[in-house]
Image: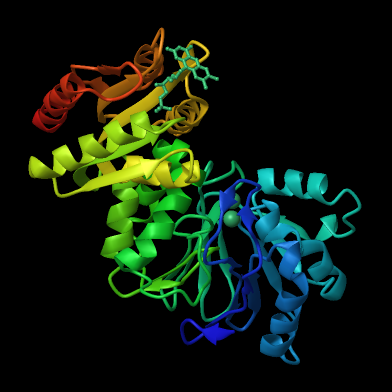
Amino acid sequence: MFAISDHITYVGAQDDDIDLFEGQYPLTQGISYNSYIVKGDKIAVVDSVDIRRCQDWLSSLRVVLADRKPDYIIVQHMEPDHSASLEAFMDIYPDTTVVISAIGAKMLGEFFPSFRYHDRVMKVSEGSTLDLGGTVLTFYAAPMVHWPEVIVTHESRDGVLFSADAFGSFAMTSSPGATSEAWAVEARRYYTNIVGRYGVSVQKVLGKIKGLDINIIAPLHGPVLSGNLAYPLGLYDKWSRYEPEEDGVLVAYASIYGHTATAARYLASTLESLGCENVVLLDLCRHDVSYAVSEAFRLSRMALCAATVDATVFAPMAVFLDHIAHRNLRGRTVGLVENGSWAPVAARKMADKLVTMTDMKVVEPAVTLHSAMTDADTATLRTLAAALLAE
Ligand SMILES: Cc1cc2nc3c(=O)[nH]c(=O)nc-3n(C[C@H](O)[C@H](O)[C@H](O)COP(=O)(O)O)c2cc1C
Ligand SMILES: [Fe+2]
Ligand SMILES: [Fe+2]
């Protein structure tokens, strides 16, 4: 619990013993489920928390509300990490009005089949306002950021944007450097993997909030953002337009016995020796694919190096390609390195996937290793490195 402005208190919960978020994203710093209390003459609670931390949240509410009762609970997003504790909340505060989008209201009945408070539901849509007395909340639809029912909320008195999952991070609220690169690392992995597919929708929301007076961005995960907001806003603009943040090369590899890995390392050091200052070497077999997706969004170029397995590309690379294609990543320059001991086809399979994506430019030559790396291969890898940087 802490004040984020004169009239708004953070009442979210920290989850430091969760291993996977949404059943697939490994967490190294835990995560928070953020919730806020806005005090005007009336009181609104903004979002609930994951059921894992329901009791923590209810305790915080009790302390901050003291002898008052909440008038409204704003449900910006029905996904369970933000709404699973809603029914327990209503059982304690049954007179509260649930403020939610029309699609959210439908989902509410689906998630809580025996919900007893449908008569307390107030539906809001684009531009709806809620006057709390002393401050006004305005709601904006944010469909597909990250579900169809999402709304974001602007608070007028202190200039707070409750941004739902946007500007969230795989981190707890206390994690340092809220508007610094330290924040960006896990905020990028969060955005690119969870919302990355919906760049067009994010652009629409960025357009809507452009003219608003915003001093604080209060997302549903990770730190509350204040200070240099141009930094996170600029990153969101880039990510949602699929523009790289920096010129550089992600060298991602999937190797069974290590020969393709050797080629990838050689390629990475050659790129560095040619003056590229931003080379990230990433073993797809040993790192969760979400880290590779994040780096693929950050950097302008990729070198994809993979062994052939059963007449196709080795699975960790196929998975990575599926992930970036699914997230609509586009406009990258790509070099290909394959390996095979009798009939290498990994490069063709990777190229086949890349042509289904938008504006992916594959540079020549594709490098084919036959088992171990030879002197001839090192020469071709140097040619590929130069071509990759030349584009
Ligand atoms: C299960 C399995 C299936 C394979 N299938 C093929 C194949 O279809 N075509 C081929 O040329 N090599 C195939 N290979 C051989 C590897 O692609 C080859 O040895 C390659 O050099 C491995 O590179 P690495 O040292 O980076 O793991 C297969 C290997 C394994 C383990
Ligand atoms: Fe979500
Ligand atoms: Fe979320």
* Residue 148 image-quadrant placement: top right
Looking at the picture, the colour scheme in use is rainbow
**Vertical arrangement, residue 49 with respect to residue 55, above or below:** above
Q: Where is residue 109 in the image (x, y as percent from the top left)?
A: 81, 47
**Vertical arrangement, residue 201 with respect to residue 326, above or below:** below
Q: Residue at x 72, y 70 (%)?
A: 53
**Which of 131/261 is in front?**
261
Q: Which residue is drawn at 82% across and 72% down?
A: 95
**Which of 230/248 is in front?**
248
**Vertical arrangement, residue 34 with respect to residue 258, above or below:** below
| Left or right relative to 91: residue 264 | left
Q: Can residue 201 be seen in this view?
A: no
| Left or right relative to 159: residue 172 | right
| Left or right relative to 179: residue 77 | right
Count of numbered labels shown in the rendering: 0
Quarter of the image where the C terminus is located: top left
**Which of 159/294 is in front?**
294
Q: Where is residue 350 in the image (x, y as percent from the top left)?
A: 38, 19
Q: Position of residue 60 (x, y in %)?
A: 69, 83
Q: Residue at x 65, y 78 (%)?
A: 43
Quarter of the image where the N terminus is located: bottom right
**Which of 274/356 is in front?**
274
* Residue 72 image-quadrant placement: bottom right
Q: Which residue is drawn at 49% across and 10% down?
A: 311
Q: Can residue 226 be seen in this view?
A: yes
Which residue reaches farthest bottom?
67
Q: Position of residue 305 (x, y in %)?
A: 34, 28
Which residue reaches farthest top?
343
* Residue 259 image-quadrant placement: top left
